[in-house]
Image (cartoon, rainbow, N blue to C red):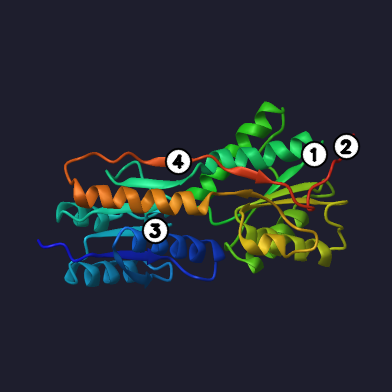
Amino acid sequence: MEPSGAIGLLVPEFGNPVFAALAQAMETHATKAGFATILCNTAGSAMREVDYVQMLLERRVDGMLFICAEVTDVRSDHAHYRQLLERGARLVFVNGGSEALPVSSVGVDERASGRLATEHLLELGHRRIGFAAGHGFALPTREKMAGRADALREAGIDPAEHVGHADFTVTGGRQALRAIMESANGDRPTGIICSNDLMAIGAMQEATALGLRVPDDLSIVGFDGIDGATWTQPALTTVEQPIDEIAGTAVSALQTLIDEPDQAVPSVTFRPQLRIGGTTAARSEA
């Protein structure tokens, strides 16, 4: 098949700024590499993702980049990815992959992210550390939860308490924090880690609604490092992922698959970085 000079870029949504940032960065790197990019918004739907994939195949794109693909939903069997591979399609997963599929992935270490955020709060003296978590069927949520559990167990703390699940949105962050606080039975957490920065911003809003001061009464840590994390008052403490490095590596991996189809392309996992803002503070607990 003659190269088309085009690649597909499938994004789950644009409501979360990190997906838009990843898409923009990958489009920039793809353009530098000589590719045209066909951008597809799957709206988080497996069926819509399948439809877009079929359209991209009909257009004979050279390869596809999936940002936070449907593959991160542990409830699904991901048969359409296997069918793509059988047809010789070149795929790279970004911000989430699957060990069950022979597909290269590029992203941040989610488990290390959960651990890093939790250890930051432990170092500040917090002992009751909650998790305003995204959906439990999402692999990144499970990995962050495992990282939090690792850190808490090493500190002699039961990780089962103070967890609330909701959407990966500002509203979801508010709902998760309220659920955590309502179920705490007078033993409320003094620190909260969140699945992403949007949820952390929601947690900040809900804390204010509950009469809690951030960070005096409640310390909050986000994840992603979106620009909006610097716009809050106070600025959000967050675990940052290297967007541009992830994007550049993903495009390079796909280009290798296109240019050298017989060469194995390893998955790449980046270490997260803690960016200290004003939403975390020392806590002295009995």
* Residue drawn at x 88%, y 63% as measured from the top left: 211
Q: How many marks?
A: 4
Q: Quickly name the residue at label 2.
A: 285
- The numbered mark at residue 269 is 4
> Mark 1 sits on what residue?
126
The reply to whether dot 2 and dot 4 touch (C-beta < 8 Å) is: no
| Of marks 1 and 3, the one in the foreground | 3
- Disc 2 from disc 4: Cα separation: 36 Å
Q: Which comes before the other along the chain, label 1 or label 3?
A: 3
Q: Nearer the viewer, mark 1 or mark 4?
A: 4
Percent position (x, y) of residue 259? Answer: 20, 50
**Which label was assigned to residue 29?**
3
The image position of residue 36, as x and y in percent, is 30, 68
Q: Disc 3, disc 4: CB below 8 Å? A: no
Mark 1 crowd level (few <14, some 14–19, many ≥20, 10 Å Cα):
many
- Is there CB contact under 8 Å for labels 2 and 1? yes
Residue 261: x, y in percent? Answer: 18, 46
Nearer to us of marks 2 and 3 is 3
Tell me the amino acid under the disc marked 3: His
Going from the N terminus, do you reach mark 3 or mark 4 first? Answer: 3
Three-letter amino acid code at the position of disc 2? Glu
